[in-house]
Every structure is written in C-alpha cells, then in structure tokens.
Image (cartoon, rainbow, N blue to C red):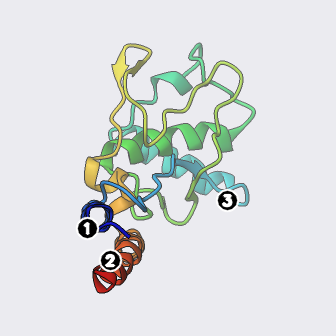
Amino acid sequence: MPKTFCFSFAFFCLLWSLCAAQGGGGSTGVAVELWCVAKNNAEDAALQSAIDWACGAGGADCAPIQPGGPCYDASDIVRTASFAFNDYSLKHGMTQDSCNFQNTAALTSLNPSFNGCKFPSSFSKGSINGTTNVGLEPTAADISSSNSARLGRLIGGLIPMSLLFATLLML
C-alpha cells in the first residue's frame, strides 16, 4: 500500500476523531421540542388555582386564553391551563421544575396546539399576538451538552482513533 495513501488516511482519521470529540462531526446530540401542559387527571380546582397564579404573580401572558383570544376555550380547563403553564415555562426555562404547578403539569414532546391556537414550543422564536415568545436559553435548549451526548461523541471519536493506530502500525 502506498505510503501517501496511508498518511492521507491516517490524517483523515485523526481529523475526524478530533471533530467528533468536539461535537463537530460523528455523533451529535438531538434537541427535543418541548411544551409544558396540564395533566389530564389534575383536579379542576387545582388547575384553576395554578392558572390564577401563572397569569398573575407568575407573569405568564394569558391574553390568548381570555374571551375573544385564539386559545380561549371555557369548556376545557386543561387546554386553558396548558397554555398558561407553557407560557410561564418558556419565560422561566423549560424544565421539570418550572413545569410543575404543584404536580398538575408535565413536559411533553406532543404538540398541544389546537384549531387556531398555536402553543409556542421550546424552539419558538418570533411572536404570537404581537408579543415576543421567549424560547429556551441555549444551555437549556441544547441537550447536546448532556453526559450521554458527550459519551456518544467520545465513542464516535474512539473508532477513527483505532483506525488511525491500525493504519500507523501498517506503515
């Protein structure tokens, strides 16, 4: 085998392993779009209390769930609470802690939007009804910095490193 090919192949493997270890190639993390929604089995009174807090002291933008708003549905308190909970969680970081509301809410990857009511997600940018939607902060939205993603990048980097050493041994 020509030494030029071996050197080129070894250089490629080294470069690939370095990129994979830094997250620039090989294995990368997967970000998940999230929403905070009310639990279907939560008591109506507990949901109403949580809505009142989220739309009041919590600072959620509840204009869309007011009468005449695109997300107003007086017959479905779970949908109403879900919109308030989601807006609050977007503004405070989409985490299990910010999406708890005394255990009446949970994070989901299933889009709760319905009819003309669009629920902003953890990836949302832009505006709804003239207000700016706040997405997750980069450190919270990007799960590629998680331990499992780091392990995947490390393993992804070990394979080309093994190929590199095998190639060098053939020289």
Query: Which of the marked residues, 2 or 3, is nearer the chain's N terminus?
Result: 3
Quadrant including the N terminus: bottom left
Above or below, 25 against 121 in this view is below
Distance from the alpha carbon under mark 2 to that under mark 3:
52 Å
Label 3: which residue?
A: 42
Residue 77 visible: yes
Residue found at the very far bottom of the displayed protein: 169
Identify residue type, mark 3.
Answer: Ala
| Left or right: 64, with 25 as reference point | right
Residue found at the very far front of the displayed protein: 2
Label 2: which residue?
A: 161
Secondary structure, mark 1, is: helix
Above or below, 68 against 168 in this view is above
Identify residue type, mark 1.
Answer: Leu
Residue 160 is labelled as none
Identify residue type, mark 2.
Answer: Met
Label 1: which residue?
A: 14
Mark 2 neighbour density, 10 Å: few (under 14) some (14–19) many (20 or more): some
Look at 65% across and 18% down and name the residue there. Answer: 116
Nearer the observer, 39 or 115: 115
Look at 27% across and 47% down and name the residue there. Answer: 137
